[in-house]
């Protein structure tokens, strides 16, 4: 294996494109690892940790593109460079490329929304340009200082514009999915969410129950923090309250700051429409007192909204009870997730059952599990957390870190079950189950040779309209011996039931 690197001066690609290119590069024959990224200090630090920071990359600047590959032959570099060449547009598509937001706005005067995915050091500046040009903004970029976020959201509020993000990965505006999103039917349920995969999960549950989505407004994960104060969620509620397509509103978030939760709930009284609130760990008493409909889970949030907007008789199927044989040593459940809210929902199901759970998304820094640490006890990891995505593609695009962790967890004789999610939709991996099957087979082989059954639980987030086929992904998992759940909520409850079985087995 040899390392080959090249720097392309003054060559910019947005982070979404580079995530996709890196994933494809790592799938080329003869490639051990490949990295395609802008020449920021953060990215060079990542390369150094990977042992790939060769001397010719040291002088790369923020505006330079770095390509580095460890492979059997240096000739593979040509294949990677070919991935950077933009394909000719299909019939009816525009081939115009603009170098600035102002030029794009001038060339498309009817445009009213900008999607921004640049390095966090520049993202705030570009977002401000877009807002000052009268454009709504979806800011995919992360690593934007919270002070800039507050200033941008206040500017957007004053101008009557949406400022979705930073770190906003999901939105559906006028039936068009932006960045990560699923193919859902149009309808009368609107969503405002401070969680990307949480928003996706609620939207696909609404779809599965026969409802549809009017608008899905993402806020970015920090919006309900004390520093930001819920600016975008409050503006999002007001926007959906005024939207004639929306009859019911769902709010989705990981645990908000208490003072911000009170401000957000105060908006319910003036919305003039039913509001369903799914805040993980939220208070039913507080939501009910504000006039809202409390939902203890993502599935319940979708169910209550569909009952209010579409069909009061809508129902979900009851939970299936697990049944597994365990060795005396098997004691723990490990969760390996791509979606942060999906991870949270399963983790909180175990916490509600009185189980002590380690997770890299817990807010107590003294209980934070570093990315490279061995798992202990019940451990739930969000591979979309900054600990894992610093300089790397999101696991919804490149699941390689999670695949390696799956095999490592299988080697632990104390592991009874591994819980995973597989996310379909626009922007996600073209075959998330298929790329994971070899690791699943290896994990099961390790456990079998060790004389134990390893229960693998998988949930596929998607709809019957998504590509690849939801039914095909489920069938592939089932053929590999994976227990497939039907929602994020059921996944968490199934994990909780597994823990109950483990407890009973240890008492016997």
Image: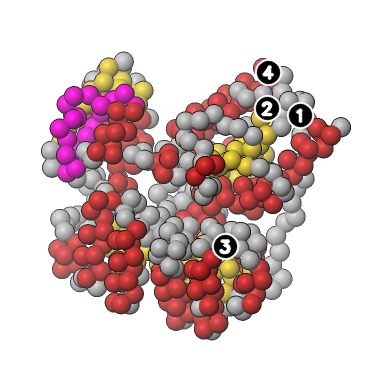
- Percent coordinates x, y for residue 399 in the rendering: 45, 36
Q: 321 or 277: which is nearer to us?
A: 277
* Residue occupied by mark 3: 279
Q: Identify the secondary structure beneath mark 4.
A: loop
* Residue depth check, mark 1 versus mark 2: number of the one nearer the observer: 2
The residue indicated by pointer 1 is: 326
Element on which disc 2 rests = loop
**Horizontal and vertical percent for residue 302?**
61, 64
Work out how far the residue at label 3 is from the one at label 1, CA to CA, in angstroms.
35 Å
Q: Is residue 370 left or right of residue 92?
A: right
Say whether disc 4 or disc 1 marks the residue closer to the N-terminus: 1
Mark 2 or mark 4: which comes first in sequence?
2
Cβ atoms at labels 2 and 4 below 8 Å apart: no
The structure residue drawn at horizontal position 77% and vertical position 42%, both measured from the top left corner, is 500
- The residue lying toward the viewer, choosing from 220 and 375, is 375
Q: Residue furthest right?
A: 508
Side of 90 where 98 appears, left or right: left
What separation in Å lies between label 2 and label 3 (alpha carbons)?
33 Å
Q: In the figure, 392 relative to 364: above or below?
A: above
Q: Which residue is mark 2?
A: 414
Residue 163 vertical position relative to residue 337 in the rendered view, above or below: below
Reading the chain from its start, which is encountered first: label 1 or label 2?
1
* The N terminus, quarter of image: top left
Q: CA distance from mark 2 to mark 4?
A: 11 Å
Counting residues from the start of the chain, the first of labels 3 and 1 encountered is: 3
Q: Quadrant of the C terminus?
A: top right
The residues colored magenta run 50-68
């Amino acid at each position: 294996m040899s390392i080959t690197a090249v720097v392309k001066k003054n060559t910019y690609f947005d982070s979404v494109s580079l995530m996709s290119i890196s994933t494809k590069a790592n799938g080329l024959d003869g490639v051990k690892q490949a990295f395609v990224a802008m020449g920021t200090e953060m990215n060079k630090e990542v390369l150094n940790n990977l042992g790939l920071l060769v001397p010719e990359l040291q002088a790369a600047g923020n505006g330079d593109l770095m390509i580095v590959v460890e492979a059997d032959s240096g000739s593979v570099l040509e294949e990677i460079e070919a991935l950077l060449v933009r394909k000719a547009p299909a019939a009816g598509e525009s081939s115009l490329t603009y170098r600035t937001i102002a030029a794009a706005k001038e060339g498309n005067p009817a445009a009213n929304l900008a999607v921004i995915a640049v390095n966090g050091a520049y993202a705030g500046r570009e977002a401000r340009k877009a807002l000052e040009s009268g454009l709504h903004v979806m800011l995919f970029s992360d690593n934007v200082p919270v002070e800039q976020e507050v200033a941008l959201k206040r500017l957007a509020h004053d101008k009557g514009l949406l400022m979705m993000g930073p770190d906003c990965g999901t939105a559906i505006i006028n039936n068009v999915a932006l960045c990560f999103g699923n193919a859902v039917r149009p309808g009368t349920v609107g969503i405002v969410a401070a969680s990307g995969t949480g928003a996706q999960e609620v939207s696909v549950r609404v779809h599965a129950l026969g409802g549809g989505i009017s608008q899905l407004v993402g806020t970015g994960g920090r919006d309900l923090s004390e520093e930001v104060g819920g600016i975008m969620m409050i503006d999002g509620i007001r926007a959906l309250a005024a939207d004639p397509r929306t009859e019911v509103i769902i709010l989705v978030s990981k645990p908000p700051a208490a003072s911000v939760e009170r401000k957000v709930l105060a908006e319910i009284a003036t919305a003039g429409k039913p509001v369903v609130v799914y805040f993980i760990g939220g208070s039913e008493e507080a939501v009910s007192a504000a006039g809202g409909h409390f939902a203890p889970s993502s599935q319940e949030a979708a169910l209550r909204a569909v009952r209010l907007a579409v069909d009061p008789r809508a129902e979900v199927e009851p939970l299936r009870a697990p049944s597994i044989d365990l060795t005396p040593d098997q004691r723990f459940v490990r969760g390996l997730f791509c979606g942060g809210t999906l991870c949270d929902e399963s983790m909180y199901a175990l916490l509600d059952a009185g189980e002590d759970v380690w997770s890299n998304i817990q807010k107590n820094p003294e209980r934070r599990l570093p990315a490279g640490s061995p798992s202990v006890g019940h451990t739930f990891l969000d591979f979309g957390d900054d600990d894992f995505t610093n300089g790397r593609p999101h696991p919804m695009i490149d699941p390689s870190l999670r695949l390696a962790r799956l095999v490592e967890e299988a080697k632990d004789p104390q592991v009874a079950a591994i819980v995973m999610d597989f996310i379909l939709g626009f922007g996600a991996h073209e075959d998330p189950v298929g790329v994971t099957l070899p690791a699943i087979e290896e994990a099961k082989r390790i456990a079998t040779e060790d004389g134990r059954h390893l229960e693998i639980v998988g949930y596929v987030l998607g709809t019957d309209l998504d590509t690849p086929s939801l039914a095909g992904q489920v069938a592939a998992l089932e053929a590999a011996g994976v227990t497939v759940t039907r929602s994020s909520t059921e996944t968490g409850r199934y994990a909780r039931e597994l823990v109950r079985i483990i407890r009973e087995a240890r008492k016997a």
